[in-house]
């Protein structure tokens, strides 16, 4: 049976349960502890990165080196389903030259 996509989670509880079932380790603040691509990022970055990799970002822009940046506009319904987003209005995601996923939360 295929592994459930992270971005299929309907709310924060389901997302955390899914991530833990897939072997992701999160600290008490929701930061990814696993070494690698997402290390040190909040678990919601995994959700939005999965969305971006499937073409569901709201916008895409490029930095001065022509690297893509995926942009998500956070709506009230997103904050209701995923309370850890808090007052976030926008999340930008990109991959560093070293292969790490980086994020910038605005709002």
Image (cartoon, rainbow, N blue to C red):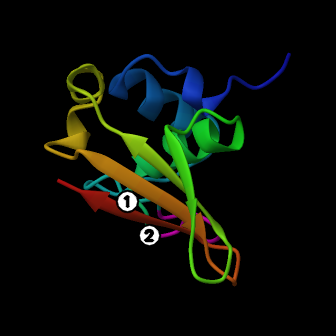
Q: Position of residue 94 (x, y in %)?
A: 57, 65
Q: CA distance from mark 1 to mark 2?
A: 6 Å
Locate residue 78, reporting x and y percent: 30, 26
User: Observer-nearest residue: 23 or 107?
Assistant: 107
Q: Out of 63 and 38, give the one closest to the viewer.
A: 63
Numbered tag placed on residue 31 in the rendering: 1
Spot occupied by residue 63 in the image (x, y as percentages of width and height): 56, 75
> Where does residue 43 sit, x and y in percent of width and height?
43, 49
Q: Quarter-wise, where is residue 77 in the image?
A: top left
Residue in the picture at 47% in, 51% down: 45
Q: Which mark is residue 40?
A: 2
Circles 1 and 2 in contact, beta carbons < 8 Å: yes
The residues colored magenta run 33-40
**Which residue is found at the position 37% from the left and 21% from the top?**
11
Q: Give the residue displayed 69% in from the left and 83% down from the top.
A: 97
Q: Is residue 106 above or below residue 4?
A: below
């Amino acid at each position: 049976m295929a592994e459930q996509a992270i971005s299929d989670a309907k709310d924060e509880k389901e997302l955390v349960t899914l991530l833990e079932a897939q072997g992701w380790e999160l600290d008490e603040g929701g930061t990814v502890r696993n070494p690698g691509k997402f290390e040190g990022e909040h678990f919601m970055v995994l959700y939005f990165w999965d969305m971006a990799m499937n073409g569901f970002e709201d916008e895409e822009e490029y930095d001065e080196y022509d690297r893509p940046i995926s942009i998500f506009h956070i709506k009230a319904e997103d904050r209701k389903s995923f309370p850890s987003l808090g007052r976030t209005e926008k999340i930008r995601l990109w991959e560093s030259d070293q292969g790490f996923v980086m994020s910038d939360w605005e709002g």
